[in-house]
Amino acid sequence: MFLFWEHGMDYVPASGLRYLFIDFNAFFAAAAQHDEPDLMGRPVVITPHKSEYSGAIAASYEARPFGITRGTRIREARELCPDLVVRPARHDRYVGLHKQLMSAIGTVLPVDKVYSIDEAAFRLGRREREREAALAVAEEVKEIITKRVGPAFRSSIGLAQTRLLGKLAAGMNKPDGLTVLEASDLPGKLLGLPLSKIPGVGGGIEKRLAQNGVTDFRGLWDLAPKHARAIWHSVQGERFWYALHGYEVAEPPTKTMMFGHSRVLTSGYRSPDKARAVARALLLKAAARLRMAGLLATRLSLNMKRAPDGVSDVEVGFEASRDSTRFLDALNELWRHASESLDAKNQGMELSHVSVFLHGLMAPDDPRAVQGDLFACAGRAEERAEKGRLWEVIDQLNRDADGRLARLAAPPGKGAKRRMGSTLPRHVMLADQQAIDLDYLGTKIAFSRVPKEEEFLC
């Protein structure tokens, strides 16, 4: 076995099949069919908001022959398929089902890495690296999913030398496929794959590749590792090249760079005043997650979009903080600047989207954070610390871990209930949040992150 070493990086050519990569097909829609067995075999879409004009975030495979895909507006989808079933998103439920699925598969193979709510890689053992043995394990995984969780969760599985190749293999036969990519299959089986379908090749990278004469998979395959590094402008390009060619590559640990949320504004929330209330609620959500992680933020970014084509991006910095009051003051400042740039104060002006992000993160014991406190007067530093502790208490009240507050708020003789597609109520909120539909506000399933269950209670 050869070992390639460059700039402190070891790349080992993998022998045999090393990974089983699983991609759950139409996961959100499958979750609805799992919870309501009568929906099995029927066209189902999942909507993020209670609006006929919102786009579907998932469509079952039964809905797709009608031309319904992710992004299709609900109103249009109903016209395409009169028998369509529409269900609200239930992100906390998806996290629970994800955990059940990972636990079930974990009885067969150890989890190597979870990439998203519906994608994960599992490491094959030494005795499972030959083709027939790996196929047998894959079939066992499919059987254990049906037996322990349910038949609604169809999955496409890829078997390959690396996680990247496993993901590519899993995407080759959907839904419910099982594909093997061995060293002898490369690059032949992948030559027809568009560059845009390859993980790690986003729009910006694809443009750089084209500028270097690479417009198809063959051109990508024939690159030299150092050339890939130059095109990517980072070592990630070299890591990508080796993973694509079947080399074992250690993936760097992910690091949280920011906490933020966004919202497409539905009818009733598009006026500047209503949109500002939504942005404030999103910011409080992000701040609660920041405190849950035990971190401080030093910058806040705001993005506003005016229908149909106006955009404003503004940002402000401040001393390291975990205090939502400080963040709200910063948002007020940013909102004023963004509104002026979009002329959003005009009567009848409508906004279509808002997003807020806390970044410039650091730990409380970071020398930069400590230095900031040294330059602040003692009284101001203590006031900031007290406000931070106050918001931590508010976080605890809203999480209501034992359900005591929910029971107190419920009618006599009845427990706390929630309808399908809703979250438990927040017990402490801003006055202007009371008129907002807060269901899953700001909490969604990211493509590269599975939310913690407690985030739904922030």
Image (cartoon, rainbow, N blue to C red):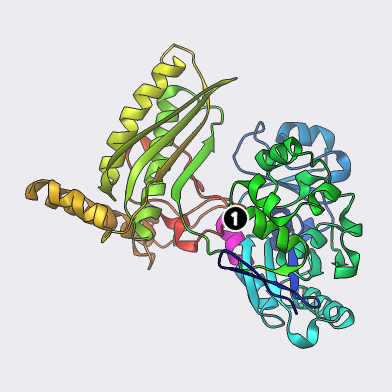
> Residue at image x 37%, y 54%?
290
Q: Is residue 185 visible?
A: yes
Q: Is residue 170 above or below residue 227?
A: below
* Quarter containing the C terminus: bottom left
Residues drawn in magenta? 90-98
* Quarter containing the N terminus: bottom right
Q: Is residue 435 visible?
A: no
List the residue tagged with mark 1: 235
The stretch drawn in magenta includes residue 96: yes
The residue most toward the top is: 347
Q: Nearer the viewer, residue 56 or 168?
A: 168
Q: Position of residue 446 (x, y in %)?
A: 58, 52
Question: Would you say the magenta stretch is mainly helix, strand or loop?
Answer: helix
The residue most toward the bottom is: 127
Left or right of 12 on screen, residue 250:
left
- Amino acid bearing label 1: Val
Q: Is residue 444 above or below residue 55?
A: below
> Residue at image x 37%, y 47%?
360
Left or right of 233 on screen, residue 320:
left
Q: Position of residue 274 (x, y in %)?
A: 43, 28
